[in-house]
Image (tube, rainbow, N blue to C red):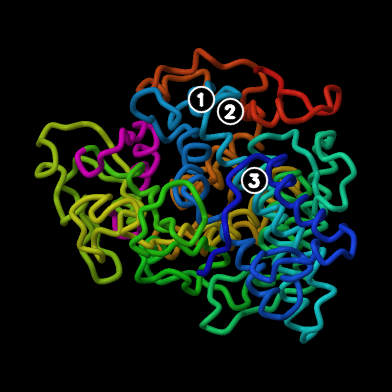
Amino acid sequence: MKKMKNIKTSIKGILAVLAVFALNTNCSDSVLNQDNPNDLVPTSFWQTPEDANKAIIGAYSPFLAITYYSRFEIFLSDYRDDVVNGFNTSDRTAAGAFNATADRNAPKWMWEAQFRGVSRSNDVLFYVPNIEMDETEKNNIIGEAHFIRGLNYFNLINNFLNVPIIKTPISEIAAPDLIPQAPPADTWALIEEDLKMAQSKLPSSWPATQTGRATYGAATGMLGKVYLYQKKYDLAKAEFAKIMGTTYTLTDDYAANFTEEFENNVESIFEIQLISDGNQGWGADSASSGSGSAYQADLAPVGYTNQNTMRVNQWALDLFLDEKTINGEIDPRTYTTFFWNTQDSTQYQGKSLKSRTYLNASYEEAFSPTGTNIFGNKYADWEFNGKKESRDGGWHASGNNVRLLRYADVLLMFAEAEVMSNGGNSTQPAVDAVNEVRRRVDMPEFTTVTMQDIEDERIKELTFERTRYFDLLRWGRVKSRIVESDFKSESGGTGSYKPGREYLAIPLSELDGNNNDEGFKQNPGY
């Protein structure tokens, strides 16, 4: 994916850079003030269909930054949940220990990357409608911009809660240093509006050369998720139903969802398109910076990474082992998700699954016959990529995509919305949706389902897929599951917790750069 020039700064900095563009368009008509044709300014850039396409690809680009989905996002999602017990104290484990204060790097970097995506989407939405081009192509690009902005704001509100709403370029904002935080209800409304607009303008599919661009299905699935997070259950299940039984289906092999070889498959609804491009640049989304799956080093077992990494809390493995397949074997998802000390195997999809990690090493070969630590295995891709460790070849040697939304998740969210809209009671549509997920991995089918069944299934299906912490957050269970436990024992525990720290601190750079003392404040608990 071609990427535009990075703007590595805070919201205020992004707006300030764009202000230069505005100044260039408001000078006198003196020959001394004519635009340099070699400079990228609004008057020289936003002219052609090619410009519009470059701009929308630039809006996707922040997703690929190492400060976002390429790596650091995982510390603000999976590393905060009750499955992961991150080793040592650092920026990587601070959020999970409720110690990601306003001066920490991880929240600051991701805030910047997310608002960079918002800013670039705003540019597209402001300038592209005025470009003479094919109307269908124009509408598709505008739909993508709404989707990208909506997805970034979805991440912002779930991480920071109290965020400013910015919908236009800087040239349209009189006092950018006075932008207030919006009430969360207003931010949710903007996300809904963006995704509805995306639905109305996005195609159901793209040509193979454009794989990875947002589609009607991606907008619809995300809109359903947005409704679910707000407990608008009837609206949520209606959106999910629009894409159930259509072009999406489950892959035959569960593990195919986490390898580079089988990315963008029939189950995929939206993925972050990471690339093994050989670049090693750190932190940006410019053309010289790597866009590979650097997060793999933080899921890999000890000894197969040079990062601190983590271990899995015992309860999670126990949940996977609680029930057997219809053949009396271990749930095949367990082997894809975890690496643990066992000699057991499961026959699945014509293969004998065993606990293995990089270079097909058994637990005994990797560690010892008596080891008890449980490690991550999902996304390791060891069976196909032939690597001896997670960073074999450098940060960006693997291009394994991040699967942000896949059909199995939609089925389980539909089941949740169906049960909750019926007072917590089982319904046949909910049972059918959960059973479709379970059938794929040879698990016995349910005759009724409870919310506990759905939660357990989400853990087994979606662990290490950036969902568990935000499930706990929307269910109001962060404190009971994480604070009142020893699940963060490897990184200093949760003694820093205060009410409100379920959300991250607003970065100090944003507080210092905003002069609206009454309308832009630090989150509670910090």
Q: Residues within 10 Å of mark 3 (few under 14, many from 20)?
A: some
Q: Which residue is mark 1?
A: 482
Residue at 83 percent of width and 57 percent of height: 193
Vertical comparison of 243 with 324: above or below: below
Question: Which amino acid, mark 3?
Answer: Asn
Question: Which amino acid, mark 1?
Answer: Ile
Mark 1 or 3: the one toward you: 3
In the structure shown, which secondary structural element does the residue marked by tag 2 occupy? helix
In the structure shown, which secondary structural element does the residue marked by tag 3 occupy? helix
Mark 2 or 3: the one toward you: 3
Label 1 – label 3 distance at C-alpha: 21 Å
Residue at 66 percent of width and 75 percent of height: 53
Instruction: Check residue 327 for magenta coloring.
Output: yes
The location of residue 137, given as percent across then percent down, is 73, 82
The location of residue 220, given as percent across then percent down, is 71, 65
Q: Which residues are magenta?
A: 303-329
* Mark positioned earlier in the residue sequence (2 or 3): 3
Q: Which mark is residue 155?
A: 3
Q: Residues within 10 Å of mark 1 (few under 14, many from 20)?
A: many
* Mark positioned earlier in the residue sequence (1 or 3): 3
Q: Which mark is residue 478?
A: 2
